[in-house]
Image (cartoon, helix red, strand yellow):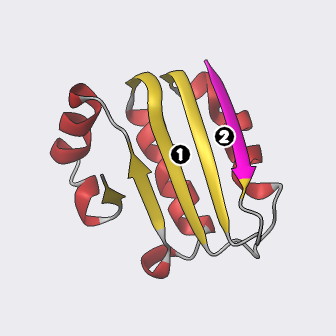
């Protein structure tokens, strides 16, 4: 399990990559991934290509990111989810809060 992030060259977009299990064990590293670049970031991409699992604490972490990024005006896209993760997002109505592709 690992969290990494990269900032676009213009500093406006932050991509956060989730690898392995997205659960409470990565809470601190997930929060650091979006807090370290600072508030100047305009949009966020959460890449779930290598994520194998997520639980309710991961849903909470995504909600904390949303609050940090501006709440209703936040620009957060979650990409490359496997079918199981997409089902969890659908059941949780996260499709109404995030752009899930």
Residue at 64 percent across and 34 percent down: it is: 27
Q: Main secondary structure of the magenta part?
A: strand
**Residue 7 on image: x %, y %:** 74, 57
> Dot 2 surroundings within 10 Å: few (below 14), some, or many (20 or more)?
many
Quadrant location of the N terminus in the rendered image: top right
Disc 1 + disc 2, Cβ < 8 Å: yes
Residue at 66 percent across and 32 percent down: it is: 3
Residue at 83 percent across and 55 percent down: it is: 36
- 95 shown above or below 91: below
**Residue 34 on image: x %, y %:** 70, 54
Give SS at disc 1: helix
| Residues at marks 1 and 2, CA–CA distance in whole angstroms | 8 Å
Q: Quadrant of residue 94?
A: bottom left
Residue at image mark 1? 61
Give SS at disc 2: helix
Left or right position of 32 against 53: right
Left or right position of 63 against 85: right
Query: Is residue 12 or residue 86 the one in the foreground?
Result: 12
How many discs mark residues in the rendered view?
2
- 61 shown above or below 40: above
- 97 shown above or below 17: below
Q: Nearer the viewer, mark 1 or mark 2?
A: 2
**Residue 91 on image: x %, y %:** 16, 43
Circle on res. 30: 2
Of mark 1 and mark 2, the one earlier in the sequence is: 2
Query: Is residue 7 or residue 68 the one in the foreground?
Result: 7
Task: Report the span colored magenta.
Answer: 1-6
Left or right position of 38 against 87: right
Left or right position of 18 against 52: right
Answer whether residue 10 is magenta in the image: no
């Amino acid at each position: 399990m690992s969290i990494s992030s990269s900032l676009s060259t213009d500093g406006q977009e932050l991509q956060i990559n989730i690898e392995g299990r997205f659960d409470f064990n990565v809470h601190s590293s997930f929060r650091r991934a979006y807090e370290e670049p600072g508030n100047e970031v305009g949009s966020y991409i959460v890449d779930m290509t290598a994520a194998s699992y997520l639980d309710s604490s991961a849903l909470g972490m995504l909600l904390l990111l949303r609050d940090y990024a501006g709440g209703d005006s936040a620009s957060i896209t979650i990409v490359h989810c496997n079918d199981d993760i997409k089902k969890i997002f659908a059941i949780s109505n996260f499709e109404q809060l995030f752009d899930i592709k």
